[in-house]
């Protein structure tokens, strides 16, 4: 067979081989942060913990890492679009997120998503009849993620967010403070690795660096700072 005909016959096979480890559905790695849309009708879930360390400006020399239960659920609605729900809770205070994402592959290894999330948080603290305080608010989080599949079992995601305050209300006894201004609260960047853990179980392990004027987990400290503070977070979750 002439050399040109041999090359023409091999090109389709070579092209399929280059995509096979990453594109075949049966070989898709379980994922939750990686910016690849679930198949239409597919559900993805994870459960874990997120640890947020208090800034020294709020607690001085005492550094407290506050854990919160972190549950995530996703549902594919088309080849590119999917919806997201996320609950972070410490029992006395919680943060509920709902959002929508659009995702697409850039290459066989690199994926991109953009989205918008709405969050509502609530906290209450009562000490017998002496102290009764509660607060709640809403935020908007436009976001974008870029993911790279290092191998068929190992992938890394970089995610950026803008944090917009929409509404804040806190009450202490009969006194109330309300802020309805739409304003930029800060931003966050996350680095998340997803990989096998044991057997067929996969995990997410990441770091989120938030630089913002307010963090819902520390509303009860009533800080008087009108400047952004650094809130480091460690993320760990089992992909179900």
Image: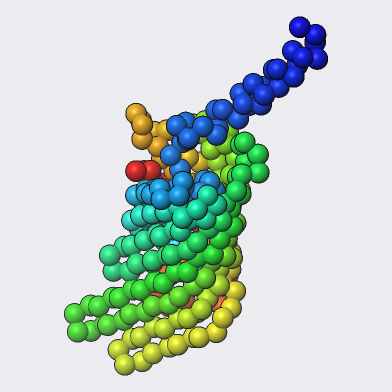
Quarter of the rendering containing residue 9: top right
Residue occupying the point 46% across, 55% down: 77
Q: Determine the residue located farthest toward the top in the rendered image.
A: 1
Relative to residue 188, is residue 49 drawn left or right?
Answer: left
Residue 150 percent location from the top left of the image: 58, 33
Residue occupying the point 55% across, 52% down: 80
Residue occupying the point 57% across, 65% down: 142
Asked if 191 appears above or below 68 in the picture, the reply is above
The C terminus is located in which quarter? Answer: top left
Residue 124 percent location from the top left of the image: 30, 75
- The residue closer to the viewer here, 205 or 225, is 205
Relative to residue 149, is residue 205 drawn left or right?
Answer: left
Relative to residue 163, is residue 48 drawn left or right?
Answer: left
- The residue closer to the viewer here, 60 or 46, is 46
The N terminus is located in which quarter? Answer: top right
Q: Residue 1, can we see it? A: yes
Colour theme: rainbow
Residue 158 percent location from the top left of the image: 58, 49
- The residue closer to the viewer here, 113 or 198, is 113
Residue 18 percent location from the top left of the image: 63, 26
Residue occupying the point 80% across, 8% down: 2
Q: Determine the residue located farthest toward the left in the rendered image.
A: 128
Q: Residue 56, can we see it? A: no
């Amino acid at each position: 067979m002439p050399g040109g005909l041999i090359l023409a016959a091999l090109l389709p096979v070579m092209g399929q081989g280059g995509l096979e480890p990453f594109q075949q559905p049966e070989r898709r790695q379980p994922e939750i942060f990686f910016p690849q849309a679930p198949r239409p009708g597919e559900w993805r879930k994870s459960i874990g913990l997120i640890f947020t360390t208090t800034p020294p400006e709020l607690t001085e020399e005492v550094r407290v890492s506050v854990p919160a239960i972190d549950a995530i659920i996703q549902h594919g609605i088309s080849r590119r679009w999917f919806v997201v729900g996320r609950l972070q809770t410490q029992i006395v205070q919680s943060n509920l997120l709902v959002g929508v994402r659009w995702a697409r592959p850039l290459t066989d290894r690199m994926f991109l998503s953009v989205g918008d999330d709405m969050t509502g948080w609530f906290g209450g603290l009562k000490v017998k009849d002496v102290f009764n305080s509660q607060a709640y608010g809403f935020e908007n989080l436009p976001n974008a993620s870029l993911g790279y599949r290092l191998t068929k079992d190992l992938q890394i995601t970089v995610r950026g967010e803008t944090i917009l305050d929409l509404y804040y209300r806190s009450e202490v006894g009969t006194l109330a403070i309300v802020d309805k201004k739409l304003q930029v609260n800060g931003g966050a960047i996350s680095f998340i690795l997803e990989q096998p853990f044991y057997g067929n179980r996969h995990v997410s392990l990441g770091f989120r660096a938030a630089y913002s004027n307010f963090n819902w987990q520390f509303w009860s400290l009533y800080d008087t700072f009108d400047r952004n503070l650094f809130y480091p977070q460690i993320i760990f979750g089992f992909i179900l």
